[in-house]
Image (cartoon, rainbow, N blue to C red):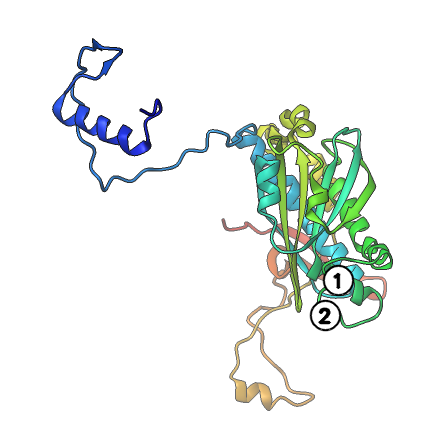
Protein backbone atom coordinates (compact mmCIF):
# COMPACT_ATOMS: atom_id res chain seq x y z
CA UNK A 1 0.00 0.00 0.00
CA UNK A 2 1.25 3.49 -0.82
CA UNK A 3 2.45 5.43 2.21
CA UNK A 4 1.50 8.79 0.64
CA UNK A 5 -2.16 9.56 -0.01
CA UNK A 6 -3.19 11.13 -3.28
CA UNK A 7 -4.96 14.49 -3.40
CA UNK A 8 -8.28 12.75 -4.17
CA UNK A 9 -7.94 10.46 -1.13
CA UNK A 10 -7.12 13.40 1.15
CA UNK A 11 -10.13 15.38 -0.13
CA UNK A 12 -12.43 12.34 0.41
CA UNK A 13 -11.25 11.85 4.01
CA UNK A 14 -11.63 15.54 4.83
CA UNK A 15 -15.14 15.60 3.38
CA UNK A 16 -16.16 12.55 5.47
CA UNK A 17 -14.69 14.10 8.59
CA UNK A 18 -16.53 17.41 8.08
CA UNK A 19 -19.92 15.95 7.21
CA UNK A 20 -20.10 12.97 9.62
CA UNK A 21 -17.79 13.99 12.43
CA UNK A 22 -15.98 10.66 12.15
CA UNK A 23 -12.66 10.09 13.89
CA UNK A 24 -9.43 9.65 11.99
CA UNK A 25 -7.25 6.75 13.07
CA UNK A 26 -3.48 6.57 13.03
CA UNK A 27 -1.25 3.64 14.07
CA UNK A 28 -4.30 1.72 15.34
CA UNK A 29 -5.00 4.27 18.10
CA UNK A 30 -8.39 6.03 17.94
CA UNK A 31 -8.16 9.81 17.81
CA UNK A 32 -10.83 11.94 19.45
CA UNK A 33 -13.13 13.44 16.87
CA UNK A 34 -13.00 17.19 16.53
CA UNK A 35 -16.10 19.33 16.33
CA UNK A 36 -17.67 19.10 12.89
CA UNK A 37 -16.71 21.99 10.60
CA UNK A 38 -19.41 23.78 8.65
CA UNK A 39 -19.59 22.89 5.00
CA UNK A 40 -18.15 25.51 2.65
CA UNK A 41 -20.26 26.61 -0.28
CA UNK A 42 -18.88 25.53 -3.64
CA UNK A 43 -19.46 28.97 -5.17
CA UNK A 44 -17.24 30.85 -2.72
CA UNK A 45 -14.76 33.41 -4.10
CA UNK A 46 -11.16 32.82 -3.11
CA UNK A 47 -8.79 35.77 -3.34
CA UNK A 48 -5.12 34.90 -3.88
CA UNK A 49 -2.67 36.37 -1.38
CA UNK A 50 0.90 37.15 -2.40
CA UNK A 51 2.92 36.52 0.75
CA UNK A 52 6.06 37.82 -0.98
CA UNK A 53 4.56 41.16 -2.06
CA UNK A 54 6.99 43.88 -0.97
CA UNK A 55 5.70 46.74 1.14
CA UNK A 56 8.78 48.61 2.27
CA UNK A 57 7.89 52.21 1.32
CA UNK A 58 5.22 54.04 3.32
CA UNK A 59 2.35 55.97 1.79
CA UNK A 60 3.74 59.44 2.54
CA UNK A 61 7.18 58.42 1.35
CA UNK A 62 5.71 57.05 -1.87
CA UNK A 63 3.89 60.32 -2.44
CA UNK A 64 7.17 62.17 -1.98
CA UNK A 65 8.86 59.89 -4.51
CA UNK A 66 6.03 60.45 -6.98
CA UNK A 67 6.39 64.22 -6.66
CA UNK A 68 10.10 64.10 -7.44
CA UNK A 69 9.65 61.84 -10.46
CA UNK A 70 6.72 63.89 -11.75
CA UNK A 71 9.11 66.82 -11.70
CA UNK A 72 11.62 64.67 -13.59
CA UNK A 73 8.99 63.88 -16.25
CA UNK A 74 8.58 67.58 -17.01
CA UNK A 75 12.33 67.91 -17.47
CA UNK A 76 12.33 64.83 -19.70
CA UNK A 77 9.58 66.34 -21.87
CA UNK A 78 11.73 69.40 -22.46
CA UNK A 79 14.98 67.57 -23.21
CA UNK A 80 13.40 64.98 -25.52
CA UNK A 81 11.53 67.67 -27.44
CA UNK A 82 14.76 69.64 -27.80
CA UNK A 83 16.88 66.70 -28.96
CA UNK A 84 14.32 65.37 -31.45
CA UNK A 85 12.92 68.76 -32.54
CA UNK A 86 9.41 67.47 -31.88
CA UNK A 87 6.64 68.28 -29.44
CA UNK A 88 6.99 65.29 -27.09
CA UNK A 89 5.14 64.81 -23.80
CA UNK A 90 6.57 62.63 -21.04
CA UNK A 91 4.47 61.62 -18.01
CA UNK A 92 5.38 59.68 -14.88
CA UNK A 93 2.53 57.17 -14.84
CA UNK A 94 3.65 54.81 -12.05
CA UNK A 95 6.08 54.48 -9.15
CA UNK A 96 5.93 50.95 -7.75
CA UNK A 97 7.77 48.71 -5.30
CA UNK A 98 8.09 45.10 -6.40
CA UNK A 99 10.46 42.17 -6.69
CA UNK A 100 13.21 42.36 -9.29
CA UNK A 101 12.08 39.10 -10.90
CA UNK A 102 8.53 40.48 -11.23
CA UNK A 103 9.88 43.67 -12.81
CA UNK A 104 11.73 41.67 -15.46
CA UNK A 105 8.62 39.62 -16.25
CA UNK A 106 6.48 42.73 -16.71
CA UNK A 107 8.76 44.46 -19.21
CA UNK A 108 6.72 44.97 -22.40
CA UNK A 109 8.16 44.08 -25.80
CA UNK A 110 11.77 44.56 -26.86
CA UNK A 111 13.63 47.20 -24.87
CA UNK A 112 17.16 48.56 -24.69
CA UNK A 113 18.85 48.11 -21.30
CA UNK A 114 21.39 50.48 -19.79
CA UNK A 115 23.23 49.25 -16.70
CA UNK A 116 24.34 52.22 -14.62
CA UNK A 117 26.49 52.93 -11.62
CA UNK A 118 25.10 55.91 -9.75
CA UNK A 119 27.56 57.06 -7.13
CA UNK A 120 27.34 57.08 -4.13
CA UNK A 121 25.02 54.09 -4.59
CA UNK A 122 26.90 50.80 -4.76
CA UNK A 123 24.24 48.58 -6.35
CA UNK A 124 23.58 48.71 -10.12
CA UNK A 125 20.67 50.74 -11.50
CA UNK A 126 18.84 49.83 -14.71
CA UNK A 127 17.36 52.24 -17.24
CA UNK A 128 15.31 50.92 -20.17
CA UNK A 129 13.81 52.47 -23.28
CA UNK A 130 11.42 50.98 -25.83
CA UNK A 131 13.40 50.05 -28.93
CA UNK A 132 10.66 51.52 -31.12
CA UNK A 133 11.03 54.89 -29.39
CA UNK A 134 14.80 54.73 -29.29
CA UNK A 135 15.25 53.64 -32.90
CA UNK A 136 12.90 56.38 -34.09
CA UNK A 137 14.93 58.85 -32.02
CA UNK A 138 18.16 57.59 -33.62
CA UNK A 139 16.69 58.09 -37.09
CA UNK A 140 15.52 61.57 -36.10
CA UNK A 141 18.92 62.55 -34.67
CA UNK A 142 20.63 61.41 -37.87
CA UNK A 143 18.40 63.72 -39.90
CA UNK A 144 15.60 61.33 -40.83
CA UNK A 145 11.89 61.70 -40.28
CA UNK A 146 11.82 59.38 -37.27
CA UNK A 147 9.08 57.27 -38.84
CA UNK A 148 10.53 53.77 -38.76
CA UNK A 149 8.64 50.92 -40.40
CA UNK A 150 10.74 48.04 -39.06
CA UNK A 151 12.50 48.04 -35.69
CA UNK A 152 15.47 45.67 -35.24
CA UNK A 153 15.70 43.48 -32.16
CA UNK A 154 19.21 44.65 -31.39
CA UNK A 155 21.24 47.81 -31.93
CA UNK A 156 24.62 48.12 -33.56
CA UNK A 157 27.45 49.82 -31.71
CA UNK A 158 27.02 52.92 -33.89
CA UNK A 159 23.26 53.06 -33.19
CA UNK A 160 23.91 52.69 -29.46
CA UNK A 161 26.33 55.61 -29.64
CA UNK A 162 23.76 57.82 -31.38
CA UNK A 163 21.04 56.73 -28.94
CA UNK A 164 23.21 57.86 -26.03
CA UNK A 165 22.83 61.41 -27.35
CA UNK A 166 19.25 61.12 -26.06
CA UNK A 167 19.66 58.67 -23.17
CA UNK A 168 22.49 60.66 -21.57
CA UNK A 169 20.54 63.95 -21.25
CA UNK A 170 17.50 62.02 -19.98
CA UNK A 171 19.61 60.52 -17.18
CA UNK A 172 21.02 63.98 -16.43
CA UNK A 173 17.51 65.35 -15.95
CA UNK A 174 16.51 62.46 -13.65
CA UNK A 175 19.62 62.98 -11.53
CA UNK A 176 18.91 66.72 -11.49
CA UNK A 177 15.36 66.17 -10.21
CA UNK A 178 16.71 64.15 -7.24
CA UNK A 179 19.41 66.71 -6.45
CA UNK A 180 17.59 68.06 -3.38
CA UNK A 181 17.62 64.60 -1.80
CA UNK A 182 20.87 63.03 -2.99
CA UNK A 183 23.70 64.14 -5.27
CA UNK A 184 24.14 61.42 -7.88
CA UNK A 185 26.73 60.95 -10.59
CA UNK A 186 25.86 58.32 -13.16
CA UNK A 187 28.22 56.20 -15.22
CA UNK A 188 27.14 53.75 -17.94
CA UNK A 189 28.64 50.31 -17.35
CA UNK A 190 26.86 48.24 -20.00
CA UNK A 191 24.19 48.42 -22.70
CA UNK A 192 22.31 45.55 -24.34
CA UNK A 193 18.95 44.46 -25.71
CA UNK A 194 18.99 40.83 -24.52
CA UNK A 195 16.82 40.56 -21.34
CA UNK A 196 18.79 37.51 -20.17
CA UNK A 197 21.73 39.84 -19.50
CA UNK A 198 19.60 42.04 -17.23
CA UNK A 199 19.82 39.70 -14.22
CA UNK A 200 22.02 42.11 -12.26
CA UNK A 201 20.21 41.59 -8.94
CA UNK A 202 18.74 38.55 -7.13
CA UNK A 203 15.15 37.89 -8.25
CA UNK A 204 13.73 38.33 -4.72
CA UNK A 205 15.36 41.72 -4.12
CA UNK A 206 12.89 44.59 -3.62
CA UNK A 207 13.28 47.38 -6.17
CA UNK A 208 11.63 50.70 -6.94
CA UNK A 209 10.26 50.89 -10.48
CA UNK A 210 9.60 54.28 -12.11
CA UNK A 211 7.59 54.21 -15.35
CA UNK A 212 7.68 57.18 -17.74
CA UNK A 213 5.47 57.20 -20.84
CA UNK A 214 6.38 59.37 -23.81
CA UNK A 215 4.13 60.37 -26.70
CA UNK A 216 4.62 62.80 -29.54
CA UNK A 217 3.18 62.61 -33.03
CA UNK A 218 4.45 59.26 -34.32
CA UNK A 219 6.95 58.54 -31.50
CA UNK A 220 5.35 56.56 -28.67
CA UNK A 221 7.12 54.45 -26.07
CA UNK A 222 8.19 54.23 -22.48
CA UNK A 223 11.23 54.78 -20.28
CA UNK A 224 11.72 52.81 -17.07
CA UNK A 225 14.10 53.33 -14.18
CA UNK A 226 14.84 50.57 -11.68
CA UNK A 227 16.47 51.46 -8.36
CA UNK A 228 17.34 48.81 -5.72
CA UNK A 229 15.45 49.41 -2.48
CA UNK A 230 18.72 49.21 -0.53
CA UNK A 231 19.79 52.44 -2.29
CA UNK A 232 16.55 54.30 -1.53
CA UNK A 233 16.05 53.03 2.03
CA UNK A 234 18.47 55.48 3.78
CA UNK A 235 16.75 58.39 1.97
CA UNK A 236 13.11 57.56 2.69
CA UNK A 237 12.77 60.12 5.50
CA UNK A 238 13.89 62.86 3.12
CA UNK A 239 11.25 61.86 0.60
CA UNK A 240 8.53 61.91 3.28
CA UNK A 241 9.15 65.56 4.12
CA UNK A 242 6.78 68.09 2.65
CA UNK A 243 8.27 71.53 3.22
CA UNK A 244 5.19 73.32 1.89
CA UNK A 245 2.93 71.52 4.39
CA UNK A 246 5.07 72.03 7.51
CA UNK A 247 6.29 75.58 6.84
CA UNK A 248 4.88 78.28 9.12
CA UNK A 249 2.56 80.89 7.57
CA UNK A 250 4.65 83.52 5.79
CA UNK A 251 7.87 81.49 6.03
CA UNK A 252 8.11 81.21 2.25
CA UNK A 253 7.31 84.86 1.55
CA UNK A 254 10.93 85.81 0.76
CA UNK A 255 11.43 82.76 -1.44
CA UNK A 256 8.27 83.44 -3.41
CA UNK A 257 9.10 87.15 -3.70
CA UNK A 258 12.56 86.37 -5.05
CA UNK A 259 11.05 83.94 -7.55
CA UNK A 260 8.42 86.29 -8.97
CA UNK A 261 10.41 89.52 -8.58
CA UNK A 262 11.57 89.57 -12.21
CA UNK A 263 8.32 88.34 -13.77
CA UNK A 264 7.07 90.98 -16.26
CA UNK A 265 3.46 92.19 -15.90
CA UNK A 266 1.32 94.32 -18.18
CA UNK A 267 0.05 97.62 -16.73
CA UNK A 268 -2.33 99.89 -18.66
CA UNK A 269 -4.30 103.07 -18.03
CA UNK A 270 -7.94 102.88 -19.07
CA UNK A 271 -9.47 106.29 -19.74
CA UNK A 272 -13.00 104.94 -19.94
CA UNK A 273 -15.32 102.57 -21.74
CA UNK A 274 -18.17 102.85 -24.18
CA UNK A 275 -20.81 100.47 -25.46
CA UNK A 276 -21.78 100.82 -29.13
CA UNK A 277 -23.41 98.64 -31.73
CA UNK A 278 -21.38 96.62 -34.19
CA UNK A 279 -22.72 98.59 -37.18
CA UNK A 280 -21.55 101.79 -35.48
CA UNK A 281 -18.10 100.30 -34.91
CA UNK A 282 -17.82 99.27 -38.56
CA UNK A 283 -18.90 102.75 -39.67
CA UNK A 284 -16.27 104.64 -37.66
CA UNK A 285 -14.11 107.02 -39.72
CA UNK A 286 -11.14 109.28 -38.87
CA UNK A 287 -12.43 112.30 -36.96
CA UNK A 288 -15.47 110.55 -35.41
CA UNK A 289 -15.92 110.96 -31.64
CA UNK A 290 -16.84 108.13 -29.26
CA UNK A 291 -18.35 109.21 -25.94
CA UNK A 292 -16.91 107.51 -22.86
CA UNK A 293 -18.75 106.75 -19.64
CA UNK A 294 -16.10 108.64 -17.62
CA UNK A 295 -16.57 112.31 -16.74
CA UNK A 296 -13.78 114.83 -17.22
CA UNK A 297 -11.51 114.89 -14.16
CA UNK A 298 -12.52 111.48 -12.81
CA UNK A 299 -9.67 109.09 -11.92
CA UNK A 300 -8.74 106.62 -14.64
CA UNK A 301 -8.66 102.90 -13.92
CA UNK A 302 -5.30 101.09 -14.07
CA UNK A 303 -5.72 97.35 -14.80
CA UNK A 304 -2.84 94.92 -14.14
CA UNK A 305 -2.81 91.84 -16.37
CA UNK A 306 -6.32 92.81 -17.46
CA UNK A 307 -7.77 93.01 -13.92
CA UNK A 308 -8.64 96.37 -12.21
CA UNK A 309 -6.03 97.18 -9.57
CA UNK A 310 -5.52 100.97 -9.13
CA UNK A 311 -7.14 104.34 -9.88
CA UNK A 312 -4.92 107.17 -11.10
CA UNK A 313 -4.93 110.80 -12.19
CA UNK A 314 -3.57 111.63 -15.61
CA UNK A 315 -0.74 114.11 -15.94
CA UNK A 316 2.49 114.92 -17.72
CA UNK A 317 6.09 114.01 -16.95
CA UNK A 318 8.27 116.24 -19.07
CA UNK A 319 7.11 115.73 -22.64
CA UNK A 320 5.44 112.35 -21.88
CA UNK A 321 2.03 111.47 -20.44
CA UNK A 322 1.88 109.81 -17.04
CA UNK A 323 -0.53 108.55 -14.40
CA UNK A 324 -0.29 109.10 -10.64
CA UNK A 325 -1.78 106.30 -8.53
CA UNK A 326 -4.29 107.71 -6.08
CA UNK A 327 -5.97 104.59 -4.68
CA UNK A 328 -5.77 100.78 -4.60
CA UNK A 329 -9.01 99.13 -5.67
CA UNK A 330 -10.50 96.48 -3.42
CA UNK A 331 -10.25 93.02 -4.99
CA UNK A 332 -13.21 90.66 -4.81
CA UNK A 333 -12.63 87.13 -3.56
In the rendered picture of this protein, how many numbered marks are placed on residues? Answer: 2
Q: Is residue 218 above or below residue 107?
A: below
- Where residue 135 is drawn, which disc sits there? 1
Q: Is residue 295 left or right of residue 88?
A: left
Which quarter of the picture shows residue 45? top left
Residue 25: image x %, image y %?
22, 15
Structural crowding at the residue carrying mark 2, measured as other residues with C-alpha within 10 Å and reported as few (<14), some (14–19) or many (≥20): some
261 over 109 or under it: above or below: above
Query: For mark 1, does the 10 Å Cα neighbourhood hold few (<14), some (14 to 19), or many (20 or more) residues?
Result: many
Nearer to the camera, 323 or 295: 323
Q: What label sits on residue 93 in the rendered view?
A: none
Please give the residue where the numbered disc 2 appears in the rendered image: 148
Q: Mark 1: which secondary structure? A: helix
**Camera-side residue: 89 or 47?**
47
> Left or right of 314: which side holds 7?
left
The image quadrant of residue 189 is top right
Amino acid sequence: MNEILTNEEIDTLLQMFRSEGGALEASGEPVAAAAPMPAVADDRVVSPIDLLKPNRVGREQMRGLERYFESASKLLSAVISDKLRLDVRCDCVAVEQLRFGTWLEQLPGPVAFYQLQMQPWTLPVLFTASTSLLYGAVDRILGGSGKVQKVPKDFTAAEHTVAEALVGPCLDRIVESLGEVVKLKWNMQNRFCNPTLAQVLPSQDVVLSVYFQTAGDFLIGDLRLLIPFACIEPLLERFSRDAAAVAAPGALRDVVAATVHEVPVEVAVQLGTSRIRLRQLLALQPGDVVCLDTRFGEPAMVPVQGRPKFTAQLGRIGNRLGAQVVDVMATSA
